[in-house]
Image (cartoon, rainbow, N blue to C red):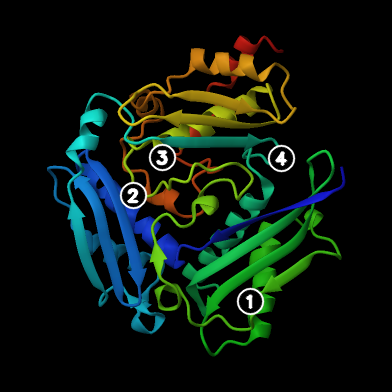
Amino acid sequence: MANYFITSESVTEGHPDKICDQVSDAILDAVLEKDPFGRVAVEVLATRGLIVVSGEISTECYVDLAEIVRSLLYEIGYTDADMGIDAETCAVISAIQGQSSDIAMGVNIGGAGDQGMMYGFATDETPELMPMPIMLAHGLVRRLAEIRKVNVVNYLHPDGKTQVTIEYNNEGKPLRVDTILISAQHHVDVSNEKIHEDIKKLVIEEVVSSDLIDDRTKILINPTGRFVIGGPQGDTGLTGRKIIVDTYGGIAHHGGGCFSGKDPTKVDRSASYMARYVAKNLVASGVCKKVEVALSYAIGVAEPTSIAVETFGTARIEDSKIVAILRKLFDFTPQGIIDKLKLRRPIYRRTACYGHFGREEQGFTWEVCDMADAIKREAGIG
């Protein structure tokens, strides 16, 4: 097989869709801080001068939705109406209702909050056991936000996107960076030459190892030549429209459900975290070098309807034996997942930007490799 190319993208916290993801999760955190058993499924729309909050919340506590929205916009950097939305003056409309009693019947007895398929993935090509393209794409947008917020450069605005293409050899090993694309929103008065110079030096060279860049690497910065109109002024945002950015950059399957704004009784979120936790521990154990874990659920039913693994020919034992080990070592019921990963805490706002996986930070319990030794023992490998 010849060499091949894989591309992944990421977006900044000021991207319209990511504003909505962060508002949804900030509201979830505010509820869980006061009521760990609150039920939340919040969807947000962002457009010029307006944030609309809708969905379902069932709790006895009170949270100030408008204040949450304004604080978040201020933190991101939307502090001027010329950017299309301003933390102080934007309109905030709420259309929140309670959770359906029909759904609550199944959740109250420990069942899944919905049906669906959830996937987790891990690979040994990076220290985080994540695909290299998405990790580099996230690193670039995080660095963009960093130099903007600490005022290393004074002309960047909150919106932005990155895209990274990696060339792999025929054994699936990353060889080099083929293309880096960065689109960064900027003040109208700055020149393209200045933007190109600063982003190459302050972003790309700080994030991407020089060993991965060669004379064939293509670097594209604001390729249209201008990115002044951005954020909700340039594009309407919605919760849950960046599900591939949130996960594995298109490398693995995706069940279709988004994560942000959903409390952990929703298996769209919690079972996806569990699948990643299991996948990462499998690779860390040495049982395989790459794996995709697939779970499926029925609404109101606790046990998953199926558990499957795909190890892409990298496993040291049969996939069927791996599934048997997982069934023995892990509790895949919604309550078991919540307890194991400690998901009733207000930890979700930080997950809503720069990816839910590959983040070895406090609170990201699904990234801990504390089951690798147990898997290794059950598999009987040294």
Q: Residue at x 67, y 74 (%)?
A: 221
Label 3 or label 4, whichever lies nearer to me, is: 3
Q: Residue 192 falls in which quadrant of the image?
A: bottom right
Q: Secondary structure at mark 4?
A: loop
Q: Earlier in the sequence, mark 3 or mark 1?
A: 1
Read off the residue under disc 2.
261
262, above or below 117, in the image = below
Q: Do callouts 2 and 1 mark residues in contact (Cβ within 8 Å)?
A: no
- Quick one: label 3 or label 2, which is nearer the N terminus? 2
Mark toward the start of the polypeptide (2 vs 1)? 1
Q: Is residue 138 above or below residue 76?
A: above
Q: In terms of depth relative to the viewer, which is nearer, 146 or 373?
A: 373
Is residue 258 left or right of 3 when viewed as pictured? left
Give the amino acid at mark 1: Asn
- Label 1: which residue? 222
What separation in Å lies between label 3 and label 2 (alpha carbons)? 11 Å
Q: Quadrant of the C terminus?
A: top right
The residue located at (62%, 11%) in the rendering is 377
**What type is the residue that disc 2 sits on?**
Gly
In what element is the residue under mark 3?
helix
- The span from disc 3 to disc 1 (Cα, nearest Å) is 35 Å
Closer to the camera in the image, 37 or 200: 37
Would residue 92 be seen by someone viewing this image from the given angle?
yes
Under circle 1, the secondary element is: loop
